[in-house]
Amino acid sequence: MTLHKSVLDSMVKIMIGSNYVRDFEKMQRLSKLIRAISMETATGSYDLQGGSCPLASSWSRQCSKVEKYARAVRKDLTDDLVVQKHNEKASSDSFVGCCLSHMAQIRSFSGKAIDKLIFTDEEVVTWTIELLAGSVVPLVHTLYEGLYLLAKHQVCQLKIQLALDHLRRSRTDNSSLLSYDSVPYLAAVCCEILRQTSGRTVGACRRVAREFKVGSYRISKSTLLIANLHAIHHDNAAWAYPEVFLPERYFDMDGRLTIPPSLLPFSMGSRSCPGGSIAMRTMMDFIAALMSKYTVTLGDYSNLLIDPPHYDLRFVTSDLRVGLELDQQSVSSVSV
């Protein structure tokens, strides 16, 4: 099982629901479509219906190669949407479920002008594909580096495992959902992974609508601005010991989880990444599932100087030791 598949399964469960994940053929078609989207197109915000985004032409070229899968995935999602819409017991925990719940609530106000407040099925399907396409590939790369960081910091893994064990013992309901409040240390670890792994990333491009000044700098109209996330996340003025992996930095003096405004992995403002919260939740769920069964250690064959990097990670349980050598092109399992 590749890391790509594991992340896609987790994200589809959050976006669409568990029943979709259990359908092998649907997941195969969706996986092939997502894999066809390159890193260049997946890290931008684009419209699958077309549009003026700079990446639209790149997406169109990609889409032409996998037109068959794109049509099939749209049909699969539309069919699933219809089933959920007519299922009174359908869960509203997923993104699609929340959209359907919102639509049902709006329709309950009879006699009102509500047409503009209700999403169409086509819009929900398009948003779902866009969020999956824009989130899965970058998140897989982040998790490769995140697992490497956790393997180097065994104490952090132990703290996550203790927090998860405490949550399991204290929880009185059957909910499996994680949140910032239920496992704050895990949320802090995910924040620190996002901060540390932003070395190769920059924020989305923004074109200046009108001239303005920032301090002594005059920014002319139509200037293209790109945020340097690595510089922001490693600024000594904003972060104490920025080179150190330190999840504890996100807790205040009273032990409350506090996310500083200088943490911007998904950019900020009205044009921030729409899939940021979904990616964060998927990341928390994935790491929680892994830490509840394994401890990650480093093997002898990691090489971060090549592109893409190669990670030699070992996943250890109490009665079984399994080694996984991870790179961004293949995943192979080796028993030791």
Image (cartoon, rainbow, N blue to C red):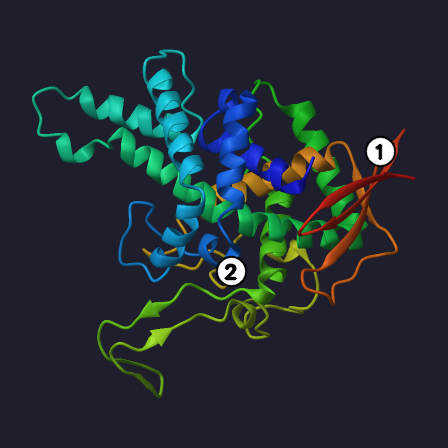
Disc 2 crowd rating (10 Å Cα; few below 14, some 14-19, many 20+) is: some
Residue projecting furthest to the right: 336
> Which label was assigned to residue 229?
none
Q: Earlier in the sequence, mark 1 or mark 2?
A: 2
What residue do we see at 35% from left, 26% from top? 78
What residue do we see at 62% from left, 55% from top? 192
Q: Is residue 336 above or below residue 62?
A: above
Q: Looking at the picture, how far across and down is residue 118, in whole percent?
A: 21, 31
- Tell me the quarter of the image containing the N terminus: top right
What residue do we see at 56% from left, 37% from top? 8
- Tell me the quarter of the image containing the C terminus: top right
Q: Work out whether residue 89 or residue 325 is closer to the camera in this orientation and state it.
A: 325
- The answer to whether the residues at label 1 and label 2 have Cβ atoms under 8 Å apart is no
- The reply, left or right, for residue 80 in relation to residue 113 is right
Q: Work out whether residue 288 or residue 335 is closer to the camera in this orientation and state it.
A: 335
Q: Is residue 162 above or below residue 88?
A: below
Disc 1 crowd rating (10 Å Cα; few below 14, some 14-19, many 20+) is: some
Badge 1 is on which residue?
317
Rendered image quadrant of residue 93: top left
Secondary structure, mark 2, is loop
Badge 2 is on which residue?
263
- The reply, left or right, for residue 255 in relation to residue 13 is right
Q: In this view, does 104 lie above or below 51?
A: above
Q: Work out whether residue 328 or residue 272 is closer to the camera in this orientation and state it.
A: 328
What residue do we see at 13% from left, 31% from top? 115
